[in-house]
Image (cartoon, rainbow, N blue to C red):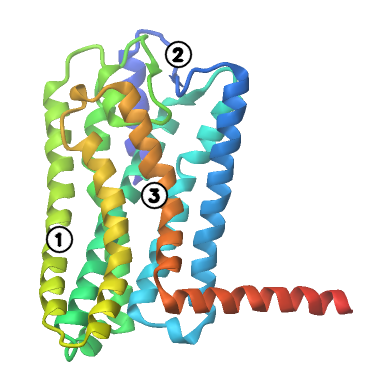
């Protein structure tokens, strides 16, 4: 189904660009060569650390039978999502640091736009499902084993992926139908809807307002669901007579709340208000935060605040060291 859509987008673009180039130029961070190399080194280190951290979580959950529970299955899916999320933009961003002309084709730009924001939307749904899981585990413990089975957990995860990739078709379609002229320089490090709308030959307040309303509904509906779930969780925890029980419950939920705060705090800065109100420099910085730093912080938060995860990671690393030394022995 994608080929006809992007074929139409390419045709529309050719009709409206007045014989201009079929590529966009990502301005990114325009610094001298030494600073570009420094930024490349920092971002490359962050990228590799993110991949390793999330892969370790997936492997620990896969190989430790004690973690074969709905909560950790959701966490493994979430870590896989973070790997896909960072791979949708960071490799091209790193290549642009080393390139004299940071260009991206029209179709490539909108494919990046679609996959990056679809996976961001999927992340909001996964965070909501994890909040629901914690609500059931703490507020409805007797019903939890029958509701959050492995099969239901898998269905919820599949639903998050499907809804995330279907929801963002409309914004991508609306922005792609705008007439783009010769001013094809995107003052950003990736194909973001705000800078793309500004490249339109004609004012597009309708598309901008629709995208802002769409983003606001998506962000606030999932954020309200998450905060409502944790409000009920906190009330239930405060009624627990045991201080140890309260500490364990708060520790379990604290890591998820930290991820929610990092992710929603950054995306609300850019995508809740209309794009014209956000300076380009602010958009770049905040986009880098939620596209690179949040996926890096997630494995650190989950592993450092979760005793079971720390034990599973220690077992994983011990097993790897044993196999390496065993191989050397031969």
Provide residue 140's location: percent of width, then percent of height.
15, 84
Secondary element at tag 3:
helix
Q: Nearer the viewer, residue 239 or 207?
A: 239
Q: Is residue 199 visible?
A: yes
State the residue in front, 197 or 285: 285
Q: Nearer the viewer, mark 2 or mark 3?
A: 3
Q: Calculate the distance from the C-alpha at mark 1 to the C-alpha at mark 3.
A: 19 Å
The tag on residue 190 is none
- Residue 265, placed above or below residue 22: below
- Say whether disc 1 or disc 2 marks the residue closer to the N-terminus: 2
Quick one: label 3, few (<14), some, or many (20+) residues within 10 Å?
A: some
Q: Residue furthest front?
A: 243
Which of the 4 quarters of the picture holds residue 273?
top left
Q: Residue furthest right?
A: 330
Mark 1 lies on residue: 227
Which residue is painted at 24% across and 22% down in the image? Answer: 178
In the rendered image, residue 12, in percent from the top left (x then y), is placed at 30, 22
* Residue that carries the numbered disc 3 in the rendered image: 294
Looking at the rendered image, the quarter that the C terminus falls into is bottom right
Give residue 125's quadrant in the image: bottom left
Q: Secondary structure at mark 1?
A: helix
Q: Which residue is mark 2?
A: 21
Mark 2 surroundings within 10 Å by alpha-carbon count, few (fewer than 14), some (14 through 19), many (20 or more): some
Residue at 63% from the left image edge and 73% from the top image edge: 317
Q: Residue at x 12, y 53 (%)?
A: 221
Q: Is residue 77 left or right of residue 313?
A: left
Labelled pair 2, 3 in contact (Cβ < 8 Å)? no
Instruction: Tell us which disc is closer to us: 1 or 2.
Output: 1
Q: Is residue 68 above or below residue 303?
A: below
Residue extending farthest bottom:
142
Q: Does 110 appear above or below 160?
A: above
């Amino acid at each position: 189904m994608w080929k006809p859509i992007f074929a139409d987008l390419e045709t529309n673009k050719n009709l409206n660009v007045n014989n201009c180039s079929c590529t966009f130029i990502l301005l990114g961070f325009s610094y001298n060569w030494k600073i570009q190399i420094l930024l490349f080194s920092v971002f490359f280190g962050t990228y590799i650390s993110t991949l390793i951290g999330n892969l370790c979580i997936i492997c620990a959950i896969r190989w430790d039978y004690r973690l074969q529970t709905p909560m950790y299955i959701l966490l493994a899916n979430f870590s896989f999502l973070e790997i896909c999320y960072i791979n949708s933009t960071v490799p091209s961003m790193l290549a642009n640091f080393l390139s004299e002309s940071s260009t991206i084709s029209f179709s490539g730009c909108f494919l990046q736009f679609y996959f990056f924001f679809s996976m961001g939307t999927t992340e909001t749904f996964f965070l909501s499902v994890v909040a629901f899981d914690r609500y059931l585990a703490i507020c409805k413990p007797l019903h939890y084993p029958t509701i959050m089975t492995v099969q239901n957990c898998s269905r919820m995860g599949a639903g998050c992926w499907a809804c995330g990739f279907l929801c963002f078709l409309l914004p991508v379609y609306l922005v792609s139908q705008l007439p783009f002229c010769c001013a094809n320089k995107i003052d950003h490090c990736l194909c973001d809807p705000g800078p793309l709308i500004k490249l339109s030959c004609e004012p597009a307040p309708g598309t901008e307002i629709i995208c802002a309303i769409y983003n606001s509904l998506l962000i606030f509906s999932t954020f309200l669901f998450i905060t409502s779930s944790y409000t009920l969780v906190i009330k239930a925890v405060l009624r627990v007579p045991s201080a140890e029980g309260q500490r364990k419950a708060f520790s379990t939920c604290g890591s998820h709340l930290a991820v929610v705060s990092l992710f929603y705090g950054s995306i609300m800065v850019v995508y809740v208000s209309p794009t014209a109100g956000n300076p380009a420099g602010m958009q770049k910085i905040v986009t880098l935060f939620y596209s690179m730093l949040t996926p890096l912080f997630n494995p650190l938060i989950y592993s450092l605040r979760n005793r079971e995860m720390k034990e599973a990671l220690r077992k994983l690393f011990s097993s790897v060291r044993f196999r390496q030394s065993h191989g050397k022995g031969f």
